[in-house]
Amino acid sequence: MEEKKFWQPPRAHRPMPVVPPVDPAALEGATRPEEPLPVFVMLDYNNGQSHEVPAFAYGWTKVHVLVSVPWPMDYYEGRKEVWVEASRVRRRTIDPRMR
């Protein structure tokens, strides 16, 4: 008789961001701010869609920006730091009353 599984861990049915790897040599001399800067970043997902999401910039070069973006996990929405093309990032402001 086959054993039944009554519980299985939830799986993220949400689309996953697709971020191509960046050559580490292209990141030499990256500028790092004292505090992260609020930005919006356009992410491509594995279902073919693109969405602009709020993020924070932790460093940049002339071509790439290091951003912390929402990242789907099995049980919760986590965050991940990824390098993206600078053309996909734009600044945003946070209301000072929200700090």
Image (tube, helix red, strand yellow):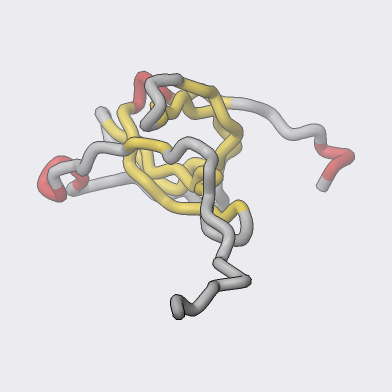
Q: Is residue 2 above or below residue 19?
A: below
Q: Is residue 5 above or below residue 33?
A: below
Say which quadrant the N terminus sits in: bottom left
Q: Position of residue 9 (x, y in %)?
A: 56, 66
Apparent side of residue 5 relative to residue 44 in the rendered image (left or right)? right
Viewer-nearest residue: 37 or 81: 81
Residue 34 place in picture, x, y as percent: 52, 54
Q: Quadrant of residue 31?
A: top left
Q: Residue at position x 45%, y 43% from top? A: 67
- Horizontal and vertical percent position of residue 53: 57, 30
Residue at position x 88%, y 39% from top? 97
Q: Residue, x 33% and y 42% (percent of image)?
A: 83
Going by the picture, which residue comes out furthest to the front? 1
Which residue sits furthest right?
Answer: 97
* In the image: residue 29, left or right of residue 78: left
The residue under the point 43% across, 40% down is: 16
Picture quarter containing residue 59? top left
Q: In the depicted view, which residue is nearer to us: 78 or 12? A: 12
The count of marks equals 0
Q: Quick check: 26 left or right of 76?
A: left
The spot of residue 32 in percent (x, y) is: 40, 50
